[in-house]
Amino acid sequence: MNPQPPAPTCARHPNRPTGLACTRCGRPACPDCLRPAAVGQRCVDCVRAAGTQVRPVRTVAGAPVATSTAPLVTYGLIALNVLFYAITAVQASSLADNYRSSLFLRWALVPRLVADGEWFRVIGSGFLHWGPLHLALNMFALYIVGIQLEPFLGRARMLAIYMVALVGGSAGGMLLEPVNTIGAGASGAVYGMFGAVAVLLIRLRMNATQILVIIAINVLLSLSLPGVSLWVHLGGLVAGTLATMGVLFLPQWVRAKSPESARTIGWAAIGAVGAVSLAVIGVAAAMVS
């Protein structure tokens, strides 16, 4: 009589004989190393390998669906604006007359000074505000739109579109405001976020009437209130809207072949809008000089 062959042992526990096996890889496995599957049972190694191959769930903008809902970029931008306002208020020893501070005078958008080489004003002016009310209005608006946009765009795209809108607002001011105008505020970037919300709602096939009415009201206020820069607002609105369209619509229009290429196209669109805004600033600076 031939002796009976030894029972196979678990691939992960050689001291445990088993008559079970993974239906995916076929290796012997003890009950502790098997997990129920749609068909049969799989070993823990195959379950782990399959988990790494699952594509992450993404939003319409191609951003991974975050496990944390905290809009960290929105909070960070608000914190920076409040910080720079606090610095100007301390320097000027005044909450209302903070524009007298050295930082405010150094960073405010003045087309003639930008043309003289002080390009940092293009960005720095977007983090300055004329008193606490101006700051509060812009930060409230940024919070409202930021918490809606950031989960869909993703943190990196949200920050990129915000900065492109800020530069676009500076481009509008440089090109169309008087050369000695002093401009400051996050309004251009916030208008860009208004445009981004409108594009997102249209992309999701939701009613965008409310945000379009808000944009129209703000444009009318920019036209009627003294001391408000209409061109900075419109420049930011156009830049933010175009950049967001590039992320949400352009990949469809050019028929991107994969999610990866769609994300690349979106980033290229953001970069292109930023580059055009910088080019407009360059042309405006050349015209001033």
Image (tube, rainbow, N blue to C red):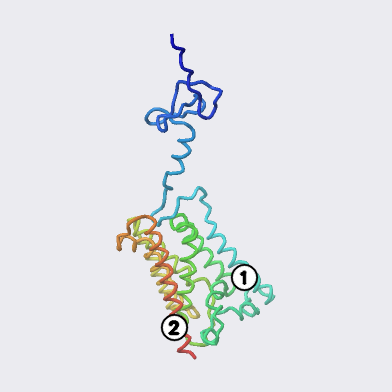
Tell me where residue 49 appears, x and y as whole percent: 46, 40
Question: What amino acid type is highlighted by mark number 2?
Answer: Leu
Seen in the image, is 138 located left or right of residue 263?
right
Please state, as top left, top right, bottom left or bottom right, where the N terminus lies in the image.
top left
Q: Residue at x 40, y 32 (%)?
A: 24
Image quarter of residue 79:
bottom right
User: Which element carries disc 1, helix, strand or loop?
Assistant: helix
- Describe the element under mark 2 as helix, strand or loop: helix
Question: Gap in Å between the C-alphas at discs 2 and 1?
Answer: 26 Å
For the image, the number of numbered tags is 2
Amino acid under disc 1: Phe
Q: Are marks 2 and 1 in contact (CB under 8 Å)?
A: no
The 10 Å Cα crowd at callout 1, few under 14, some 14 to 19, many 20 or more, is some
The residue that mark 1 highlights is: 84
Q: Is residue 247 left or right of residue 15?
A: left
Residue at the extreme top: 1
Q: Which of the pair 252/185 is nearer the observer? A: 252
Q: Residue at x 59, y 73 (%)?
A: 131
Name the residue nearer the viewer: 216 or 22.
22
In the depicted view, which residue is nearer to us: 148 or 15? 15
| Residue positioned most to the bottom | 289
**Residue 127 position in % (x across, y down):** 56, 71
The numbered mark at residue 61 is none
Residue 175 in the image: x percent, y percent? 44, 83
Query: Horizontal and vertical percent for residue 256?
Result: 33, 59
The residue wearing badge 2 is: 175
Establish if 142 lies above or below 106: above
Q: Is residue 35 left or right of residue 84?
A: left
Q: Earlier in the sequence, mark 2 or mark 1?
A: 1
Above or below 31: residue 54:
below
